[in-house]
Amino acid sequence: MQPGYFPANLFFILILAAAVGFFLKTAHQLYRLLKLGQPEDRFDRIGERLKNVAVFVLGQRRVVREPAGWGHFAIFWAFVIITIGTLETFGVGLYHGFAYWKFLGKGPTAILYLLQDLFCGAAVVALVVALYRRFVIKPERLKFTDQHAANLDASIIISLILVLIVLLMGDRAVEYRLAQMTPGDYFPRAAFLSVALSGLFAGLSEQALMGWHALFWWAHTLVILGFLVYIPFSKHLHILGAIPNVFFRRFQPVGELAKMDLEDETIETYGVSKIEEFTWKQLLDLYACTECGRCSENCPANLTGKPLSPKETIHNLKKHLLAKGKLLVEGQTGPELDKAIMGDVCTDGEVWSCTTCGNCMEQCPVFIEHIPKYVDLRRYLVQMESSFPPEVQTVFRNWETNSNPWGISFATRGDWAKGLEVKTLAEDPGAEYLLYVGCAGSFDERGKKITGAVVQLLNRAGVSFAILGAEEKCCGETARRIGNEYLGQTMSVELAEILNGYGVKKIITTCPHCFNTLKNEYHQFDGHFQVRHHSEFLAELVGQGRLKPMRTVHKRVAFHDSCYLGRYNQIFAEPRSLVKSITGVVLEEMGRHHGKSFCCGAGGGRMWMEENLGTQKINEARTDQALVLSPEVIAVCCPYCNTMFEDGLKARDMEEKVKVLDVAELLVRSLEEDKK
């Protein structure tokens, strides 16, 4: 039947209505599942949200970070162009004389057809490469537990897109031949692929060409409508979920955890144990996942053989949501209703392996928020089930009694400063800056040396600062990320009251974890401060000439980005400029650096847990990455990173050959006698 003529147009309308109706019904069902989630406000700053869609969806900014992303870029835009062309195809289905050039004009139509041919040609190449990668190269990030199902789904989608392109180009080629035979008709020669392919139909009669046109048109129409029906049930559900997920991305700092309302007596459980206890945005994340595997490819736990793959977590949660959610919204019963997330969908090893390094969220092209989900699951385990690694029990007790994880008497918190030129706020309440030392800088022997180096530099630069001494309390950062929200909030409130009591406005920290929570989370506890990490503050002092590295330090230095300083707070340049300011230092970058830096393994409370799972310890893996550069020094900006690298070097019997130094310690050396 020729499209656009009676009764073909009526037949087309019936098929179109049925496909669109089924799609809308399915989409509404998915929307109803989202409504099962808890409320969350993501409707602020609409202008910025629309800009994000333009940059990260249309521009594919995060996608093209990787070379393979350019293939997706081509496929995405080919799909957009095909969709625009499909509207013309549907118009022809309604009326045989419909054509873009009659409404848009010949010039714009020529440009549109040129773009169609360009992107469709590029997409064919990209799709062939995608098939080759999946079935021949088989990159690790594309692997799934159910690999057969994943490959089948991907093959169906890729094949459908290839078929759509072939049918579209075939129809365009025939249309070009027909246009040559019909006076007054128009088909732009700018569509170079279509024109070139038209040679396949050279010499055919007008009737034969009309037959080919009908074949291509109906096949293309049925395939694209079938694609529309199939999308919500395939891995390409992300076509529906990605755009709204980017639109509703969080604007809060990446390092800010949501505050639980512990005073709400109507709350029966804390944390998340059921899929419907996530917020609607956390559920939307599950729809948006493209299953590209970039999260798992950069996850330190996954790369060292732990039972954690962020991609698999999201995939399994999505399967559970679709199964359980359907029963909930339809009021049905079934075994899926009795499944708890922990144990039935996610495992303890999976949840406790997370270092909260943020690499999964940093690499995700559609802004899925993995870490808040892991923390919410931990919150339930800790606060409702008292289920956590046994060694953490001691750490919790130490925090409760002495406000530090070692359990050392809180009265000795300021003892590290004995013999140093440093006053407490009680002694100097007019000091411009508070040096918040933190637990590691106060009690860990190695951390104390770093604190001493910072104090020496601040004094040398004439900075007005003081410490809290024995009055200082733990900031609560690690307790919250382990899942003990009650303990974390208790410590945070206590410290915030002390800081506000002294009228503190400016804070310098030596620990990125303290820095992140004081800067990004303490507004939740009525603490509003200007917080600086010592690496950026010292770099500023050097830039101002208040500190002048004069001595040569002949060292080959491998630099490590702390997760909570770099990815979480985008402080990359300052510590590097500080190191580069030292004459004689040769700064080397590890294979994974800046936003893709590999975690040391201490974050998310892992510092206080035994690492018994996996094929390798995370800190040893990172140490090996540093040793590839044959450094004399591994430079860090975090006391946790310092500890993890020193342990890693000991495991490799390299502690005598390679030293771990904080950037402040390196700077101190440049102010002392010449170091060879």
Image (cartoon, rainbow, N blue to C red):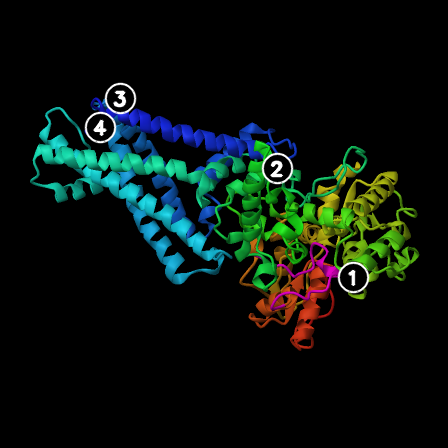
Which residue is depicted at the point 47% across and 33% down?
Answer: 26
In three-dimensional space, the C-alpha distance between marks 3 and 1, rounded to whole angstroms, equals: 72 Å
Q: Tell me where residue 12 appears, x and y as whole percent.
A: 28, 27
> Can residue 209 be found in the magenta stretch?
no
Please tell me the numbered disc located at residue 3: 4
Q: Tell me where residue 29 appears, x and y as whole percent.
A: 51, 32
Q: Which residues are magenta?
A: 597-616
Mark 3 vs mark 1, foreground winner is 1
Which residue is depicted at the point 52% across and 57% down?
Answer: 297
Local secondary structure at mark 1:
helix
Please tell me the numbered disc located at residue 391: 1
Q: Earlier in the sequence, mark 4 or mark 3?
A: 4
In three-dimensional space, the C-alpha distance between marks 3 and 2, rounded to whole angstroms, equals: 42 Å
Which residue is depicted at the point 70% across and 69% down?
Answer: 646
Q: Tell me where residue 441 appears, x and y as whole percent.
A: 80, 58
Amino acid type, callout 2: Phe
Amino acid type, callout 1: Glu
> Left or right: where does residue 327 sit relative to residue 58?
right
Q: Earlier in the sequence, mark 4 or mark 2?
A: 4
Which residue is depicted at the point 14% across and 31% down?
Answer: 179
Asked if the residue at tag 4 contacts the one at tag 1, i.e. Cβ–Cβ closer than 8 Å, the answer is no
